[in-house]
Amino acid sequence: MEFISSKEIVVFRQILRSGCVFLLIFIVSCSPPEDPIKCSSENTNCTITNAYGVFPDRSVCRAAEVAYPSTEEEIISVVAMATRERRKMKVATRYSHSIPKLICPDGQDGLLISTKYLDHILEIDAEAMTMTVESGVTLRQLINEAANAGLGLPYVPYWWAVTIGGLLSTGAHGSTLWGKGSSVHDYVVELRIVSPGGPEDGYAKTRRLNDGDEAFNAAKVSLGVLGVISQVTLKLQPLFKRSITYMTKEDSDLGDEVASFGNSHEFADITWYPSQRKAVYRIDDRVSTNTPGNGLYDFTPLRPTPSLELAVVRSSEEFQESSNDADGKCIASETITSTFVTTAYGIMFTGYPIIGYNNRLQSSGTCLDSPEDALMTACAWDPRIKGEFFHQTAFSIGLSEAKSFIQDVQKLIELEPKAMCGVELYNGILMRYVKASSAYLGKQEDAVDFDITYYRSKDPMTPRLYEDIVEEIEQLALFKYAALPHWGKNRNVAFHGAINKYKKAREFLKVREVYDPFGLFSSEWTNQVFGLRNWVTIAMEGCALEGLCICSQDFHCAPSKGYFCRPGKVYRDARVCTSLTL
């Protein structure tokens, strides 16, 4: 195709990315995401992927069969049958938003257990302020149903489509250092889980766990290896309003500000644009329910987007990558960032402060909403179209170390000022606050979570522009600052040795042995993550380009394309794929 300029791409994006649009004379809607499970015949001979259509190692995960239970009794029946046959099992969610291979059973004879139809609100106790739901209930359902009862879950992830079972299993969170913190699992007061059993149990055992029970802190964040979560009871709060103002500042004092800002505002987060040397602070606090305002959060990148626009934007970035056009990326990122800031990232408002009820401001994802429209519009990452294709690196660094990490990244930017423009095309680095958790695989201390999204080539052997900078940031965090990986995101290298950073990992593995002694809900991948069977990194040609390994030899990079394994620029212990020609 003929490529247009970066400025023209930006204008095109701004015109179209306001949601579903008029094409010719027809009003169109967004095609919702498809089921991640596909079978060649009815519920048998299946493959499964994630929402993005590919796992970090680009492998295809297969299973012999999928079951769609709609009640706890049906879960018990499915687990019992598979246990009797000693079949491997994995739980899959409706939208499958975990990037790593958490949902892949070993081999091709495994069983997938989908929670797609476990989507019922079972009980809302307004007086006790609790809500009991099945594990396939989406965050959007939970938020809306709680609000209808005058209740709210105060801190949640920002994306509607995660399910309760999925977000608990991966330790998903919102942003706060207040109260119990931002991790949803720390608001669970009871859960029910179905695990393999012996003949005396009918081959399936259902456990009801409450806060204080021996295994409760293992089950709250389990990576799916303890069984099928069937029901969850959450402690809620009375529905309240929030006040939001975005404030843009230079990032020169970001390291000094990061800890105090998180402690000063209940729902604080920061979006950092390192190459622009800017940070956008979200000043976000509770206000009286009498405060006028009914703001609505509709985050722009999570809206339905015309497929034509997505294809043009992707083609433009591919061209920028192939031509080493860092200037083009920087021009586009500055304009896109400016648009996000001036439109409050998609919050409908007439001016600051933005006032609205918590359920309307805490999460979004309208690209889930609409009926099929032949993919004229879609969620931006839908693998059925030519759209976004990216890596995500997400990790949490202790609050006391966050300043030093930020300063190290700033030193890198001083050396390579344009290096993070590509990250800024994906809205920079999102910094959220998380508190230490009682969950064995939860956060070990109060921390800042850094989420970084960046370009991924369709060709696994093609390096990225400034490949070495993001690799160095990744290794800085994971090894110099002992960052914890987000269980539902990341490339393989983030999980190398990670289990050793969890003080109660041994206790977790003891619970796993009791709940699933034959390892039917475990897989080669989860065993590697736990360090029970080597590690999850893979040494092969080009492996560092995909984050499957840390390079130790040139062939782990792309020497034929001018990328060689070299020490980091600031963190000299890092080993990164560096271009010797740029």
Image: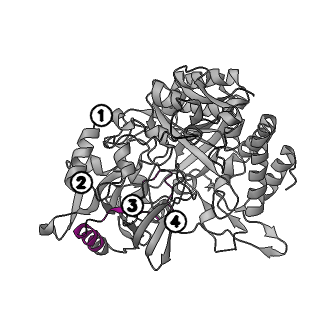
The C terminus: image quadrant: top right
Q: Is residue 178 left or right of residue 87?
A: right
- Please give the residue where the numbered disc 4 appears in the rendered image: 36
Q: Which residue is mark 3?
A: 107
Please state which amino acid type lies under the numbered disc 2.
Asn
First of labels 1, 2 by sequence position: 2
In this rendering, would 110 be left or right of 372? left
How packed is label 2: few (under 14 Cα within 10 Å), some, or many (20 or more)?
some
* Foreground of the two, 432 or 466: 466
Question: Spatial distance from mark 1 to mark 2, Cα to Cα?
Answer: 22 Å
The answer to whether residue 356 shows anywhere in this view is yes
Task: Give the quadrant of the N terminus.
Answer: bottom right
Left or right: 335 in relation to 236? right
Q: Tell me the residue at 50%/42% (across/down).
A: 175
Quarter of the figure with residue 461? top right
Q: Residue furthest bottom?
A: 42
Q: Amino acid at mark 4?
A: Pro
- For residue 210, the mark is 2
Give the extent of the magenta segment: 76-103
> Which residue lies under the disc numbered 1?
503
Alpha carbon distance from label 3 to label 4 = 18 Å
Q: CA distance from mark 4 to mark 1?
A: 34 Å
Residue under the point 19% across and 53% down: 514
Image marks 2 and 4: residues in contact by CB distance under 8 Å: no
Q: Is residue 97 shown in magenta?
A: yes
